């Protein structure tokens, strides 16, 4: 079980890392182009990141519906066609959020020159989200059918186009060039993923007539998963704001720690995604728990390797992010606390995605709303009293509470596997 999950998780991990590298290239090129351009891009990504993550999260909810058809992929065609309608709805919501960025930025007090710098970027990224959604969750379906390696090729194609177009188009076009790069990247990634899916299915998915009842059934699993992503982004945004109320050095240290946390979490999320189809295909409670337990062990092992590497490296890794010795010192001092929070975050992510495999993402959403709701309420007072050390303690406590809640929820709902329809 562990070997199978690890074999699927590895290409997913590499595809996520590849995507991060593409984003870093865009950021680097924009930073060298102009400071105002980079500031405008930061404003845009504040909305783009949660919007695109919500689209991906919603499509991830398809896995428990298609994984049972792994031995007969063509039987999943009706579900895939329903999924394309759901993807269109979610992508449209994300696109509208992109179009609203200039108005929201102006209302939030962002300087006029930064808002003006956005230019056509909101329109380009709105189309980018629609193109991404048009894939109908093809990468999720490939993972569910056991073809995770094809997801890596899709990611590599998208990243190559993104990086190449950013280098070529940003110098003459600025942010508009970055927008075109993102759009062409999505088109390349979706094309490769859909071609791979067509080979697996033997036929085109096509676009059937909307079956409202079935689309709603998919949405009951997919939309709570997307909402969970938004809650997490929102909660961490408040934590980042609270860190900014301390002092400049601590705020910078928090930014570095947050980046490292994101890198560590990639391993846990890839493992959880690889295990999700196994949970969905399980015929007994023991089978579902065995798949989930194997994923949890792999996630903890990945966190352990990352923790050991960071702790033994001293300030070598923080030096990649800042030249300020004071900031590096704060990062090194807070590493153990950050790693504790990351280990808990990775474990709860496995349990939460496992609940999605049981088609109980709404249960995970309620747990997340409770845990991160309390974190949001506590963030600013904690930062004012105990600084970023207190903030990271609060994050660790919130994640630990989620581990308990998500694990208990998974244990309770997995008991119904094989005895009653899990989605009932």
Image: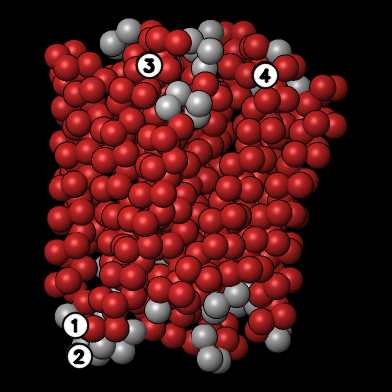
**Would you place residue 380 above or below residue 156 in this image?**
above
Marks 2 and 4, the one that precedes in the sequence:
4
> Does residue 211 show up?
no
Residue 197: percent from left, percent from top: 66, 75
Q: Where is residue 23 in the image (x, y as percent from the top left)?
A: 63, 37
Residue drawn at the location 38% of the way across and 62% of the way down: 298
On the image, the x and y values in percent for residue 179 come to 70, 34
Give the labeled residue for mark 2.
419
On the image, numbered disc 1 is attached to which residue?
A: 416
Residue at x 33%, y 70% (from the top left corner): 294
- Is 132 situated above or below 137? above
Q: Could you say whether the residue bearing mark 3 is in a helix, strand or loop?
A: helix
Residue 14 sits in quarter? bottom right
Q: Where is residue 317 in the image (x, y as percent from the top left)?
A: 50, 29
| Label 2 – label 4 distance at C-alpha | 57 Å
Q: Mark 4 or mark 1, which is nearer to you? A: 4
Check residue 31 in the rendering and tell me which mark sits there, or answer none.
Answer: 4
Q: Which of 277 and 62 is in front in this view?
A: 277
Name the residue carrying label 3: 329
Q: In which quarter of the image is residue 360?
A: bottom left
SS for dot 1: loop
Q: In this view, does 197 lie to the left or right of 221?
A: right
Position of the C terminus, as image quadrant, is bottom left
Residue at 41 percent of width and 54 percent of height:
302
Query: Which badge, 3 or 4, is on the more N-terminal residue?
Result: 4
Disc 2 secondary structure class: loop
Tag 2–tag 3 contact (CB < 8 Å): no
- Contact between marks 2 and 1 (CB within 8 A): the answer is yes
Inter-mark Cα distance, 1 to 3: 50 Å
């Amino acid at each position: 079980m562990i070997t199978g999950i690890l074999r699927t998780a590895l290409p997913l991990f590499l595809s996520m890392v590849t995507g991060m590298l593409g984003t870093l290239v865009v950021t680097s090129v924009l930073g060298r182009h102009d400071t105002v351009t980079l500031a405008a891009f930061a404003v845009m990504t504040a909305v783009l990141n949660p919007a695109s993550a919500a689209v991906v999260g919603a499509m991830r909810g398809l896995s428990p519906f298609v994984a049972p058809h792994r031995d007969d992929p063509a039987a999943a065609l009706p579900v895939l066609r329903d999924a394309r309608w759901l993807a269109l709805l979610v992508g449209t919501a994300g696109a509208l959020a992109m179009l609203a960025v200039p108005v929201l930025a102006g209302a939030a007090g962002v300087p006029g020159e930064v808002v003006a710098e956005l230019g056509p970027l909101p329109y380009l990224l709105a189309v980018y989200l629609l193109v991404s959604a048009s894939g109908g969750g093809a990468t999720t379906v490939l993972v569910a059918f056991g073809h995770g390696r094809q997801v890596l090729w899709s990611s590599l194609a998208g990243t190559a186009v993104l990086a190449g177009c950013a280098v070529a188009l940003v110098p003459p076009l600025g942010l508009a060039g970055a927008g075109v790069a993102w759009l062409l990247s999505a088109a390349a990634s979706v094309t490769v993923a859909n071609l791979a899916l067509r080979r697996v299915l033997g036929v085109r998915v096509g676009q059937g007539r909307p079956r409202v009842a079935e689309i709603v059934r998919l949405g009951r699993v997919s939309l709570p998963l997307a909402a969970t992503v938004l809650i997490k982004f929102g909660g961490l945004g408040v934590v980042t704001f609270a860190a900014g109320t301390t002092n400049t050095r601590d705020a910078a240290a928090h930014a570095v720690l947050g980046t490292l946390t994101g890198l560590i979490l990639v391993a846990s999320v890839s493992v959880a995604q690889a295990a999700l189809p196994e949970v969905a295909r399980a015929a007994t409670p023991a089978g579902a728990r065995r798949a989930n337990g194997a994923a949890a062990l792999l996630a903890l092992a990945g966190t352990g390797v990352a923790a050991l590497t960071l702790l033994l490296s001293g300030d070598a890794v923080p030096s990649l992010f800042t030249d300020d010795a004071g900031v590096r010192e704060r990062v090194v001092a807070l590493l153990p606390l950050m790693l504790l929070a990351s280990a808990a975050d990775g474990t709860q992510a496995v349990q939460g995605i496992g609940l999605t495999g049981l088609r109980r993402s709404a249960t995970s959403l309620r747990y997340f709303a409770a845990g991160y709701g309390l974190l949001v309420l506590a963030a600013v007072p904690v930062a004012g009293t105990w600084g970023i050390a207190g903030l990271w303690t609060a994050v660790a406590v919130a994640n630990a509470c989620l581990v308990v809640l998500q694990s208990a929820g998974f244990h309770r709902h997995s008991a119904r596997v094989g005895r009653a329809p899990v989605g009932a």
